[in-house]
Image: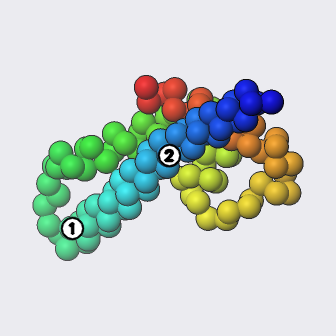
Amino acid sequence: METNVVKERRDYSEFKKLDKRVREIAYRYRYAKSKMQAYEQSLKKDVYMFREVSEPSKEVRRYEKILFAVENAISFLEPEHQQVITKDYLLAEEDFWWIHCYSRSTYYRIKRKAMSEFLSFFD
C-alpha cells in the first residue's frame, strides 16, 4: 500500500515538472510571437512612411528562432498531442476545452504523453 502512495506522488511530481517546462517554453513562444507581431507592424509602418527598412536585430532573430523551434516541434507531434499542447499552452484560451472530447483520465494520459513528446524536441 505504501509503495502505491509513493509511486502516485512521484508520478504527480513528474507531471508537474513536465507541465512547468512546457509552460516556460510556451511563455517564451507567446512573448516572441507578440514581439514579432510588433516588429512586423513597425515594418509595415516604415514601408508606408517610405522609410528605409533596416536589417533585423539579434533580438528579432532570436524571436524568429524560438517561433521556428516551437512550431517545428508542434508539427512533428501526433494530432491529439498537437491539439493538447496548442490549446493548453500556446493559445491558453479555454481551460476545460477537452471536457467534450475526453474523459479526465484519458485527457491526462494524452497530456502527459504530449508534454513528454513535445519536450523531447528541446532536450
- In depth, the one of 50 and 123 nearer the eye is 123
Rendered view: 117 above or below 35: above
Q: What residue does disc 2 label?
A: 20
Q: Residue at x 52, y 40 (%)?
A: 17
Rendered view: 35 above or below 4: below
Q: Is residue 4 left or right of residue 75?
A: right
- The quarter of the picture where the N terminus appears is top right
Picture disc at residue 46: 1
Secondary structure, mark 2, is helix
Q: How far from the left and from the top, in percent, is residue 52?
A: 13, 61
Q: How far from the left and from the top, in percent, is residue 92?
A: 58, 60
Identify which amino acid the numbered label 1 is placed on.
Asp
Rendered view: 94 above or below 109: below
Label whose residue precedes the other's in the sequence (2 or 1): 2
User: Residue 91 appears in which quarter of the rendering?
Assistant: bottom right
Q: How far from the left and from the top, in percent, is residue 26?
A: 47, 49
